[in-house]
Amino acid sequence: MMEKYAIARDSIRESKNKRDINSFKVKFETEKKELLISKQKGELRMRAILLCLVVFILIASTCGFIIYIRNRNRLFRLIVEQQKEFTTRQNKYAPYLDKNQEIKEGKYEEYDKDSQNYTNYIKDKSSGNGLPSQKKADAIWRAILLAMETNRIYTDPNVTRDSFAERIGTNHTWLTAIIKDRTGKSYTQFINSWRINEAVKILSEENCGYTNKELSELLGFMTPQSFYNTFRQQMGMSPARFRQDILSVSTADKTED
């Protein structure tokens, strides 16, 4: 009887041990699978993060490149527009500059068949619309252009409408009226446009080392701040930013070459 009991007890223990072992195996396998899944999820998250990082870098690089190209194109457009304006001005002014004329002591003379000089022209009556007659207006305009092109009168910081008019032998009313009629600009805008056009050329030079103060003095501005404000208004950026973009474009072009 005791033997049967011992056998039954051992059988129960063995059966229980087997169940415990099986339960442990199931639990182990389950935990193993969960650990594997967790690891796989971690790897997937890491891959997703890396992918996002790569995509972000690509997007940022693309955006940076697009911004660079746009800034470069914008800068080129500004330079081209400045050069086109200069060329257009040269072509437009050429007929006035190529006639039989000369400058003597700051006074312009034009000779016609009666040998009347320019000073006598402008003393005649006006055309009635605030401007002198067409012939006189052309003569004054040629004098203005010669004073700008040849004498670079715009580089004189003390030049005023009165002193400019006196220098070419007219009055400031006709001077400003003719400038407005021929360019659509006021006297100040006309003078400053020539100054800024020259500033663009200087700042576009590879070895330019001028400061704003030096440029303002060179181009006829009363103060560096006046030069800065006028340049920014006309070009849409500061002189330093323009120069920086010029150097960036120049460096990029050299790298591409």
Image: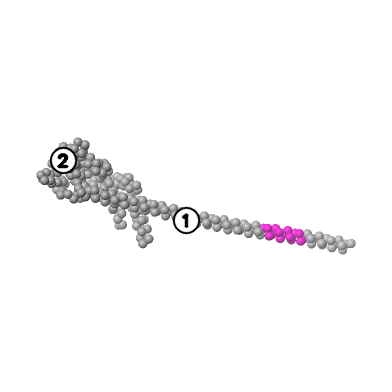
Is residue 69 highlighted in magenta? no
Task: Report the quarter where the C terminus lies.
Answer: bottom left
Q: Quadrant of residue 43?
A: bottom right
Residue shown at 36% from the left, 59% from the top: 253
**Residue 140 can be seen in this image:** no
Q: Nearer the viewer, residue 143 or 230?
A: 143
Q: Nearer the viewer, residue 25 or 99?
A: 99
Q: Is residue 3 left or right of residue 241?
A: right
Q: Residue 107 bears which disc, if any?
A: none
Residue shown at 81% from the left, 60% from the top: 12
Q: What amino acid is labelled 1 in the image?
A: Leu
Q: Quadrant of residue 191?
A: top left
Q: How is the image coloured?
A: one colour
Provide the residue designation for mark 1.
58
Label 1, secondary structure: give it: helix
Above or below, 131 against 46 in this view is above
Provide the residue designation for mark 2.
122
Single out the mark in the foreground, 2 or 1. 2
Label 2, secondary structure: give it: helix
| Span shown in magenta | 17-31
Q: What amino acid is labelled 2 in the image?
A: Ile
